[in-house]
Amino acid sequence: MSTVLQVLASALTSAVVVATVVSRCHRRRLRLAGATFPCRVWPLTGSRLGPDRSSLRKARAVWVHDVLLVQHGWLFSRLLALPVRLPEDSIRFAAPGEATGLGRVPLVMELRLDDGALVAVAAANRDRTLLAGPFLTAAIATLTPRRD
């Protein structure tokens, strides 16, 4: 009986190692597409992402033209392509508790997708230009005035 358990434990360990290696390869490929940034993405209206903000945990994203590629999942990573029509408004500061794990004052940008759905993407303040991507003018509202 202990031999069966050893074989099962060995098979499980092998599966986890293989999944980890594949996941790291996927993350590396995403980084090759451009500068990535940590983010959180959640649906606001009419999106296929899921029912609420917890549908996507912390993820990494990169802009490729007007498509936001979002990779999430630690062991079995998934890639989500969000074709963006335009930002709904300027980048804004996140409300307290709206986007956790992204620094003290994260930023949120609401994006209108090609299918009409509305999603929110939050990122750390230091990643403002990476969050804005091709819609750089949306980042202007959160710039603080220079004090000399």
Image (cartoon, rainbow, N blue to C red):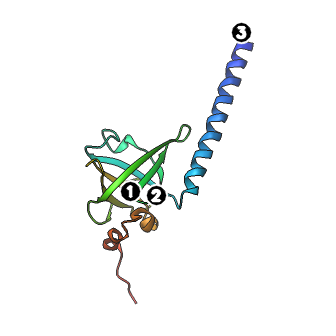
Check disc 1: other Cα within 10 Å, few if <14, some if 14-19, many if 20+. Answer: many
Q: Residue at 34% across / 45% down in the picture?
A: 53
- The mark lying in front, picked from 2 and 1, is 2
Which one is in front, 54 or 103?
54
Q: Which residue is mark 1?
A: 122
Q: Residue at 43% across / 68% down in the picture?
A: 129
Q: CA distance from mark 2 to mark 1?
A: 18 Å
Where residue 6 appears, x then y in whole percent?
72, 19
Dot placed on the residue nearer the N-terminal end, 2 or 3: 3
Q: Are marks 3 and 1 in contact (CB under 8 Å)?
A: no
Dot placed on the residue nearer the N-terminal end, 2 or 1: 2
Quadrant of the rendering where the C terminus is positioned: bottom left
Amino acid type of the residue that numbered disc 3 sits on in the rendered structure: Met
Q: Above or below — where is 59 with respect to 6?
A: below
Q: Which circle marks residue 64 in the picture? A: 2
Which one is in front, 34 or 103?
34
Amino acid type of the residue that numbered disc 2 sits on in the rendered structure: Val
- Residue 87 in which image quadrant: bottom left
Quadrant of the rendering where the N terminus is positioned: top right
- The mark lying in front, picked from 2 and 3, is 2
Label 1 element class: strand
Q: CA distance from mark 2 to mark 3?
A: 53 Å
Check disc 3: other Cα within 10 Å, few if <14, some if 14-19, many if 20+. Answer: few
Q: Which residue is mark 3?
A: 1
Check disc 2: other Cα within 10 Å, few if <14, some if 14-19, many if 20+. Answer: some
- Residue 46 in which image quadrant: top left
Amino acid type of the residue that numbered disc 1 sits on in the rendered structure: Ala
